[in-house]
Each structure stands twice: as structure tokens, then as C-alpha cells.
Amino acid sequence: MAKKLAGTMKLQIPAGAANPSPPVGPALGQRGINIMEFCKAFNAKTQDLENGAPCPTVITYYQDKSFTMDIKTPPASYYLKKAAGLKPVGKRNRPRGAENPGRETVATVTVKQVREIAEAKMKDLSANDVEAAMQIIMGSARSMGIEVKG
């Protein structure tokens, strides 16, 4: 007999840094998911990723309090900021893109770096080949004020 689905939820958790504190603990606890079991499983699955990389995670939980998780690759903006070497700024001490994308350029990346990002994100993008995935990544770069140099 199949498990009865109770619902799904999406969280963005830093790789290898899931712990019972907010926002992870309360989000899981109010749905009846075992918080420590989730944290251990998530940290084990993300140990090969760069520590602290934001990982979008889709958690499907069932009425018997069990769960499954689908961990996606970090966002393209994370990879682009890292490749461009943007330094952390602002209140939250995070790297930021341009205030006015299209009018100003905050950094540049090469086509080779865009290809590497596209290959890393290929499984999560709706592209048939690497060239199409590169176009998606270039669009993200353009909207962040990052110029792609050939």
C-alpha cells in the first residue's frame, strides 16, 4: 500500500549546515517531521557540495511522519557571483548584483565560466543541450549586471 501524501514544502538551506534552529526547525516541526533525522540526512547528502552553498530543497512529507527530499543545485546567481568574484556588501554581508542592470556592469565572466556553470546546473535547467543552458545562464548574468566576455 502506498503512503498517504500529507504535503510538500520548499526550503533553501545552506549545504552541510542544516540544524534545528530557525528557519529549518519550526518549518519542519509544525508539519510533524522529525527535525534531527532531516538535519542528519540533509547534511549527509550535501557533504560533497561546497559548504554553505544555498541548496533549494523540496521536502515531501507523508501522514506516517516520514519524508523524502529532493536537493537541487545551488542557484545560477550563486555560481555567477562566485565566478565574477563579487565581494560581500550590505546589511546581510552578501555579494550583490547591479542596482540598475542593463545600465551598469558590476563584474565580468568569461564564456568558459558560463559553460562550467551551465554544465553544473544542467540537471535542474529546462534545456536540451549545454548551448541552451548557457543562454539561460547568460540571461541570469545580464539581469544581475554581470557582463559575459567572449
Image (cartoon, rainbow, N blue to C red):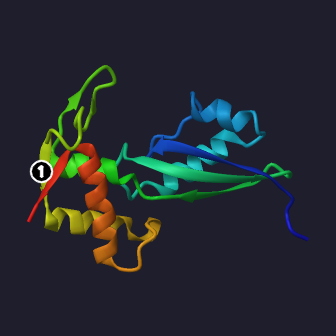
What residue lies at 50% left-to-right and 54% top-to-bottom?
A: 44
Q: Residue sitting at 56 percent across and 43 percent down?
A: 11
Residue type highlighted by circle 1: Thr
Residue 100 locus on image (x, y percent): 23, 35
Does any portion of residue 15 appear in the rendered image? no
Q: Is residue 18 left or right of residue 118?
A: right
Mark 1, residue position:
108
How dense is the environment of label 1, judged by Cα within 10 Å: few (below 14), some, or many (20 and up)?
Answer: some
Tell me the quarter of the picture where residue 130 sits: bottom left
Q: Quadrant of residue 104?
A: top left
Residue drawn at point x = 37 percent, y = 64 percent: 121
Residue 109 seen in the figure = yes
**Outermost residue to the top:** 91
Q: Identify the secondary structure beneath mark 1.
A: strand
Q: Residue furthest right?
A: 1
Q: Nearer the viewer, residue 78 or 141?
A: 141
- Residue 22: percent from left, percent from top: 57, 27
Percent from the top left, x then y, of residue 23? 57, 31
Spot the residue most to the left: 150
| Quadrant in which the C terminus appears | bottom left
Q: Residue at x 33, y 63 (%)?
A: 136
Q: Position of residue 52 (x, y in %)?
A: 37, 43
Count of residue discs: 1
